[in-house]
Amino acid sequence: MQKRAFSLTLSSLVLVAFVANAITPPSTLLERIKHSGELHVLTRNAATSYYEGSQGPAGLEYDLMKKFAEYLNVKLDITVRDNLDDIITQVETGMVDFAAAGLTVTEERQNRIRFTTPYQYITQQVVYNYDNFEKRPRKLEDMLDKQIDVLANSSHAERLQQLKLQYPELSWSEVKDTDSSELLDMVARKLTDFTIADSNEVTLYRRFHPELRVAMSISEEQPLAWAFAKGSDDSLYKEAQNFMAHMKKNGELAYLIKRHYTHASNFQYTSTNTYLAKIHSRLPRYQAMFEKAALANKLDWRLVASVAYQESLWNPHAVSPTGVRGIMMLTNNTAKHLGIEDRTDPSASISGGARYLRRMVDKVSAEYGIQEPERTWFALAAYNVGFGHLTDARMITKLRGGNPDKWTDVKETLPLLRQYKWYRKTRFGFARGNEPVKYVESIRSYYDILNWYLDNGKPKIAERSILAFKSSAL
């Protein structure tokens, strides 16, 4: 009886402990987040932070916060605010877990919130419209009698306040409830003379408005970081610090920055005007063909159109010195393999090119097991240089200690296929490996520009179809 009573007592104690543990709320913010299964993050709409792309949410900040949520094994809940003071206030008062909004670390902000170690560095740049000035403004004195618009409560406004001590005549307007892209658009449309933007934003946006120019930088390099509330509970903050350290150590942070910016920084901005002119004059003739071919092959028609522009500038009679021809510039052998009799027939060429691209996407997926967005970039490279040469480049990438599944690594290796000491080790030998790199990077920018043109109130080229597909993301 005593033994049984002891057993019952022990069981009761275990039950009490279990119940007590179940009803005791998590004590730290990190524990509460893991207990609830949700991470609440504040961000803002910007090409550099977070935006809804044609394939869903995108942006460097989005990729980082998504990976952080996966790191914590919780769901990501995103709230978007455009007013910078609202963002900082909500962080400061604990209304959200933290903000990932492309925030510059400044002394004034550090009085209210705390920042993680930086994930990126930028400079503040003065942007103007080339058509508005006979010569480039190079000094702040050139701006004193001009209209300057900046984001309210921004680091740009803080910097102008500092500069005003040296230039008392300096004046500007602070615009609320907007974003940097709208201010850059105002400069492009000549609605204001200048704005201030971070260098990473300028890199992305100049592709859409080649008339924009950088007059000067008005800051040294400044850090961008995530923002957290001050206070004694630093559990989530410390975990974010650990996450950032992990991302830097394994190279994932550097990879993401390259993935989002390198293709844009290498783009020839002067070609945008030509491209936009041809969107208006040539694309309407072929858009329905692009849509039909893309739908049949489960691709994004804007991707197929961007490939065609890179190949031929949407000229169905284009011919290269090597004998490829047509709007998709198919070789004679490829055309025969696809059953195309006349490569100069736009409909047949577009259909064949889309089928061939689909094959490359599927082959990359089957043989490499690569997921999006890398899969599309590898498929584009294979479309240009051939699948065999791409496989050779991946092998060399691995030999050199890079990751053969990452485009940022393989694109550095592809040009080595021109060098004997490298291509002699490969199966398929010499290739002009610099060409697929330029090819892929150009198509990525053409795709971005076409999306921007269609989604930002420009005159519609043709009635846009709503396509039911899951396509390769860019």
Image (cartoon, rainbow, N blue to C red):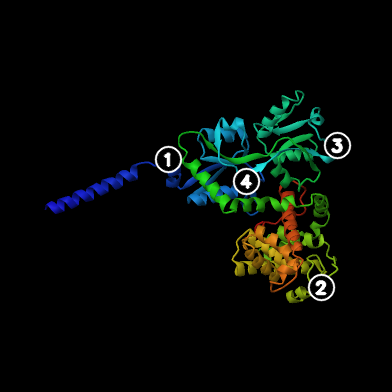
Question: Disc 3 vs disc 4: which is toward the camera?
Answer: 3
Q: Secondary structure at mark 1?
A: loop
Q: CA distance from mark 2 to mark 4?
A: 44 Å
Question: Disc 2 vs disc 4: which is toward the camera?
Answer: 4
Q: Amino acid at mark 2?
A: Asp
Task: Judge whether 405 appears above or below 461 on screen.
Answer: below
Question: Disc 4 vs disc 1: which is toward the camera?
Answer: 1
* Disc nearer the start of the sequence (3/1): 1
What residue sits 71% from the left and 56% below the top? 444
* Disc nearer the start of the sequence (1/2): 1
Q: Which residue is mark 1?
A: 28
* Disc nearer the start of the sequence (2/3): 3
Is residue 405 toward the left or the right of residue 37 in the image?
right
Within 10 angstroms of label 4, few (less than 14), some, or many (20 or more) residues?
A: many
Q: Which residue is mark 3?
A: 133
User: For residue 303, what is the image quadrant?
Assistant: bottom right
Q: CA distance from mark 2 to mark 3?
A: 50 Å
Closer to us: 266 or 446: 266
Q: Residue furthest front?
A: 421
Q: Which residue is mark 2?
A: 342
Question: Disc 1 vs disc 2: which is toward the camera?
Answer: 1
Q: Amino acid at mark 4?
A: Tyr
Estimate the x, y position of residue 88 in percent, counting from the top left.
Answer: 57, 34
Q: Secondary structure at mark 3?
A: loop
* Disc nearer the start of the sequence (3/4): 4
Q: Which mark is residue 50?
A: 4
Q: CA distance from mark 3 to mark 4?
A: 33 Å
Q: CA distance from mark 3 to mark 1?
A: 56 Å
* Disc nearer the start of the sequence (4/1): 1
Q: Amino acid at mark 3?
A: Phe
Asked whether the beta carbons under mark 2 and mark 3 sit within 8 Å of each other, the answer is no
Within 10 angstroms of label 3, few (less than 14), some, or many (20 or more) residues?
A: few
